[in-house]
Structures are given as structure tokens and as C-alpha cells.
Amino acid sequence: MTTEPELRAGQIDILVLGLGNVLWADEGFGVRAIEALNAGYEFPDNVRLMDGGTQGIYLLPHVQSADKLLILDAVDYGMEPGTLRLIRDDDVPSYMGVRKVSMHQAGFQEVLASARLTDELPERIALVGVQPELLDDYGGSLRPCVKARIPDAVGMALEILDEWGAGGRARTSPASASDSVSPGELEIGLYESGRPQLNGAR
């Protein structure tokens, strides 16, 4: 296991952060995308995958400790639902703050602003965001057009991490419980099966 001093001396500390609330339909995209990334791939010790949920300012210490930050989230670009976009570096804070889909984005924009003020903003930032279709559905899951983009978002994340020198390796066996990035009871299969059908849709 690589120690923290060794990481700082010779490797780049990378935080991969899934944002959102899985209880509100497409708002949970970032969390579901990072779950899929974690389920399918393993990474070097200097890469941390984290379900950031809606923690807002409480994520500040994690962001400050990272040299590079990759965010997965639902973002209102004003585009066709299911559209994926990659935003990089200085453009990321503005996209986290404009046309917010939920309060967690306001909180995370504050995280980035605070990290910048303390001169601890990661040197590289990338945002993989999907245009949501529906948010106002408490207990609902991702809409089909948004759920279908998870593999593409995972692929984009892998390309960025490879570009940053931290490529993933496909898992040869399922991730253990200790490797999970979010509570097992909210795993997408269990979550979706626990909600009754409403007019033929979840």
C-alpha cells in the first residue's frame, strides 16, 4: 500500500467525485455513474472514488487535498435530455453555478470557490455532466435516456484518468463490500425494484 507521503512525492492524488441525490430521478446520475465506474474498474492507489452525494461544503477538505479532480454530475446545459458534455478546468465552476438542477450544485460551487481562495484548488478539473430529463420525481430512478448514458460517462471518465496517468484496469472479480463507494441498500437494482410501478413508469 502506498503511503500518503510517497503519493505526494511521486504521484498525483486524483479525486473522482460523483455528485447528486439518487432519490430525485436524474439528479442521481453522478452517483450512479461513479458506482458503475467502481463496479467495473480498479485504479492505482493515488485515485480515490467517492460518492459525494449532496454533502456540499463538507467536501471541501477532500477537494483541497486533491491535485486533480474529476466530477460526474447532472448538469442543466439547456440541451436535449441525455446529452453528455465534458467541461474542463476554469470553465467548470461556472457550469456548477449556472442553471442549477439542485441545491447541491450551489454548495459545490462554494466548495470550488473556497478551494480557490485558500490556494488549494486542484491543478486540473474535469466535469462529465449529463443533461437531465426529469428531476421532480421523489423516489424515482434515472430516466431511460439518462440511464443509457452511464456507460458513455464511464468511458469518458476512463479516458480522462488515462490522460492523467491513472488508467483503470477492468475488474476480474466483483468489488468487495469494503470497496463500495455508496450504501448497498441504495444500489440501483435494489432501489428500482423497491418502488411500485406508477402508470407503467418508475
Image (spheres, rainbow, N blue to C red):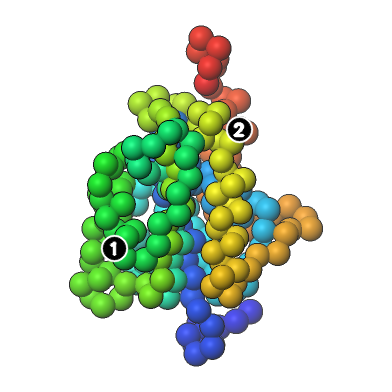
Is 162 in front, or is 71?
162
| Residue at mark 1 | 112
- What is the secondary structure assignment of the residue under circle 2? helix
Name the quadrant containing residue 108.
bottom left
Residue 22 in sight in this render: no
- Which amino acid lies under the numbered mark 2 shown in the image of this protein? Leu
**View extreme (top): residue:** 199
Name the quadrant containing residue 76.
top left
Q: Are marks 1 and 2 in contact (CB under 8 Å)?
A: no
Q: In this view, does 68 lie to the left or right of 149?
A: left
Q: Which residue is drawn at 56% across and 55% down?
A: 156
- Mark 1 / mark 2, whichever is N-terminal: 1
Measure the alpha-carbon separation of dots 1 and 2: 33 Å
Instruction: Give coordinates of residue 191: x percent, y percent.
Output: 55, 31
Q: For the image shown, how many numbered marks are present on the structure? A: 2
Tell me if residue 89 comes above or below residue 67 in the rendering: above
Instruction: Give coordinates of residue 40: x percent, y percent.
Output: 68, 53
Q: In this view, does 36 lie to the left or right of 66?
A: right
Name the quadrant containing residue 1.
bottom right
Q: Which of marks 1 and 2 is in front?
A: 1
Tell me if residue 148 comes above or below residue 72 in the rendering: above
- Dot label at residue 190: 2
**View extreme (right): residue:** 172
Tell me if residue 82 comes above or below residue 177 in the rendering: above
- Dot label at residue 184: none
Is 6 in front, or is 73?
73
Q: Residues within 10 Å of mark 2 (few under 14, many from 20)?
A: few
Instruction: Give coordinates of residue 45: x percent, y percent.
Output: 60, 74
Q: Residue at x 36, y 47 (%)?
A: 54
- Which amino acid lies under the numbered mark 1 shown in the image of this protein? Leu
Residue 161 in sight in this render: yes
- What is the secondary structure assignment of the residue under circle 1? helix
